[in-house]
Structures are given as C-alpha cells and as structure tokens.
Image: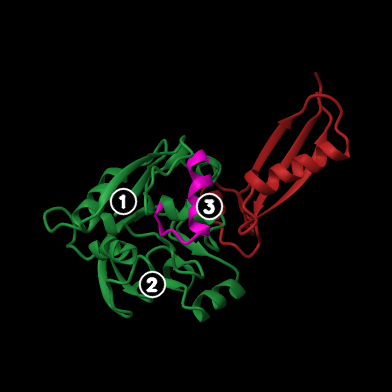
Amino acid sequence: MPRVVVDVMPKPEILDPQGKAVHGALPRLGFADVVDVRQGKRFEIELEGEVDEDRLAEVHRMAETLLSNPVIENFTVHVEETVS
Amino acid sequence: MKVGVVTFPGTLDDVDAARAVRLAGGEAVSLWHGDADLRGVDAVVLPGGFSYGDYLRCGAISRFAPVMEKVVEGAGAGMPVLGICNGFQVLCESHLLPGALIRNASRRFGCVDQRLRIESAATAWTSSYETGQEVTIVLKNGEGCYVADPATLDRLEGEGQVVARYVGNPNGSQRDIAGVANERGNVVGLMPHPEHAVEDLCGPGTDGLGFFTSVLSALV
C-alpha cells in the first residue's frame, strides 16, 4: 500500500518551546554541540490504490486544511515506498 | 436574550460560562458540538477546556464540529461570538480571528489572577468597560502565547482590534495581546477567563461580569 508522508514543522520565525525544552535536556545527558532543536509532526497516510498527481494534490489539501496551521507551520509531502 | 454555550468533548468551563450569562441577566442555552443547530440563540460563547484532548493542535478538530458551521455562518452575519481560552483557539483555527496560540514561552502552565487592560470598549463583548480600564481576571493556560506575523499585528493595533492586553506578560504573547476582535467587533477571542471572575465568593472579584453584560446590552 502506498504511503504518503506529511511532515509539519513550526515556521522558523515561530518560537518552538518544545524544541527548546528538548535542546535544554540534551547537554544534561552528555550530548554536546547541539546548536538547535525544532520539534515537528510526521503524519503517515496510507492510501488505497496508486498515488497519482490528483491523490497527492488531495493530500496537500488535507495538510493545508487539517494537518497544519498555515499561520504557524510549514509542511512538506512525499511518497514513501512501503514494504508489505 | 439567549446566549448559547457550546460543549465539545473535553470542554471544562461550559457550566461556569452559562452561570456567568445568568448572573449577567441573560438566558443561557446549552449547545452541543455535534448538532448543526444554534437553537435560536442571539449570541454564542465557546468556553475553555481541552476540546478533543487538544489533539493535533488546540482547537484544530473542534473547528470542524457540526455546530461550528452555524457559528461561522452566524458570526459572518454579525452575531456576537466570544471564544474564551480553548474557545479563542477554536476561533483562530476557524479563521474567524487572525493569528494563532502556541505553547507558553515559559513552557509552564500558568494559573494566576491576571491584570489586564481593556484596549477596546468598542466590541460586542467589552462595551461595559472603559477603554484603558484595568481589570483582574483568572488566567489558566498552557498554550496561550498569541502569535501573528508583524503585518497582522500592526493591522490589529491600527484598526483597534486588540481587545485586551496583559499588564505583565505571563505567556510570551506578542505585543502583550490577551484578546483580539474581528473587524466588525462581534467576534472576540480572549485567553483569560472572565466567567471565573463573576462572583466574590469564588474568584478574584467580579471584573469578568462586564463581558457578559456587554453582550446583553449589545443585543437589546
């Protein structure tokens, strides 16, 4: 079954308190030289049938409407080969 | 005057909001998220809480609840709508109000009696106040940091759409914004909870009552 992945990230100019919290924890665990951490979301969408341009356009609409908030987030869409 | 109070799965403050409506002299009508029906109300309050568990983003799923179709339709026709806390997040997700609310810059949930300055008394929900008046209202949120791009913030300030500002910023909100209105002033979103400040017995005073008396006088 084809899998379409939507990655959602906070826009660069938007404060990311969760990423900051993770970034703050890393040195305490001994992970040095981490300059920044941003935390986002990954959605794995399983579709029936072939993924053509229309289906991808539909996933774009899903991402715009529900999966991301365009005021604070950017998203990317890509197709992943799945092993069944 | 009938003021509807919407209950979503995970809403917490619907009972307090309905009580505030009654204390202000209005009739509170319970509205259910799953019914595309406003039951003839004259105004709507979207109360606070954690609708749909705040899954995905706060307010993101509630926005598509059947009742919201009617709320958006009514708001477009001039019906007064107040979103408090989670309700504010729902209004932003619905694009009825500009901007968004993200996790507090402090990374802490805040629960305080918050000093606010009313910046605009020219909305359906703030006419009982004087512009510039300071009030104390309960603030309790983890994701109350108001953000918008600089052009939007400039426009909100220029058009008098900033309804209230924090006196002492508790959550990192841009330009200390605690509440905003749409252009027409019938839709207001507010992060603090006026419905928890309507009685001396339980709360920091009665400073919140004005939001509810305002809408009742707007509807006369």
- For the point 37% across and 54% down, the residue is B42
Q: Earlier along the polypeptide chain: callout 1 or callout 2?
A: 1
Q: Secondary structure at mark 3?
A: helix
From where the camera sits, is residue B4 visible?
Answer: yes
| Stretch in magenta | B65-85
The residue under label 3 is B73
The residue under label 2 is B165
The residue under label 1 is B2
The amino acid marked with disc number 3 is Glu
Nearer to me, A54 or B24: B24
Give percent across and percent down for residue A10. Answer: 63, 55
The amino acid marked with disc number 2 is Arg
Tell me which chain appears green: B
* Colour option used: by chain
Q: Earlier along the polypeptide chain: callout 2 or callout 3?
A: 3
Residue B61 is left or right of residue B191, and the answer is: right
Give percent across and percent down for residue A7. Answer: 70, 44
Say whether marks 1 and 3 touch (CB < 8 Å): no
On residue B136, the disc is none
Using the numbered discs, state the Cα–Cα distance from disc 1 to disc 3 in whole angstroms.
17 Å
